[in-house]
Image: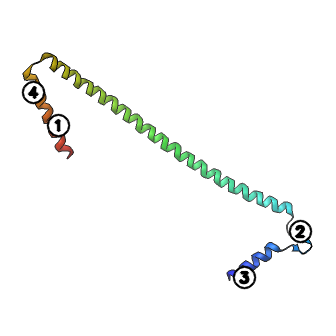
Amino acid sequence: MNSRRDRNARAALFDGIEEGGIRASSSYSSHEIDEQENDRAVDGLQDRVNLLKRLSGDVHEEVETHNRMLDRMGNDMDSSRGVLSGTMDKFKMVFETKSSRRMFTLGTSFVVIFLVVYYLIR
């Protein structure tokens, strides 16, 4: 069945070619054929444009998502910086007073906090 279809396709392809040259098919003029080819090319280009438009929209959404995530990370880093600076101020205060009792309490509290966090994470 494929060979019959191939023969019909070949016959349609070479219909209009004679030994002395090419004769125009009675049903189509060369202008109509060119116009049909142009229409098919325009349709193909329109499909590609639509695909690129969807892709660029997807890229835009992805960029917006990443920007929001980076903004949240920046805010979290700022709050962490505030907590860390408060802790460093407390360290400075403890070291400036040189009180052994405060130093012992501070060291013990850090060890306890570290162990609690360690066991919570594990």
Reading the image, the residue beneath label 4 is: 105
Residue placed most toward the observer, 61 or 3: 3
Mark 3 vs mark 4, CA separation in Å: 96 Å
3 and 4 marks in contact (CB < 8 Å): no
Q: Which of marks 1 and 4 precedes in the sequence?
A: 4
Task: Give the quarter of the image for residue 89.
Answer: top left
Q: Amino acid at mark 4?
A: Thr
* 1 vs 2, front mark: 1
Mark 1 vs mark 2, CA separation in Å: 90 Å
3 and 1 marks in contact (CB < 8 Å): no
Q: Amino acid at mark 1?
A: Phe
Mark 2 vs mark 3, CA separation in Å: 25 Å
Q: Residue at x 72, y 54 (%)?
A: 42
Q: Which of marks 2 and 1 precedes in the sequence?
A: 2
Q: Which of marks 3 and 2 precedes in the sequence?
A: 3
Element type at mark 4: helix
In the displayed structure, does residue 24 sit left or right of residue 37? right
Task: Give the quarter of the image for residue 115.
Answer: top left
Residue 40 image label = none
Pinpoint residue 118: horizontal percent, then vertical percent. Answer: 18, 42
Q: Which of marks 1 and 3 precedes in the sequence?
A: 3
Q: Which of marks 4 and 3 precedes in the sequence?
A: 3
Residue 24 image label = 2
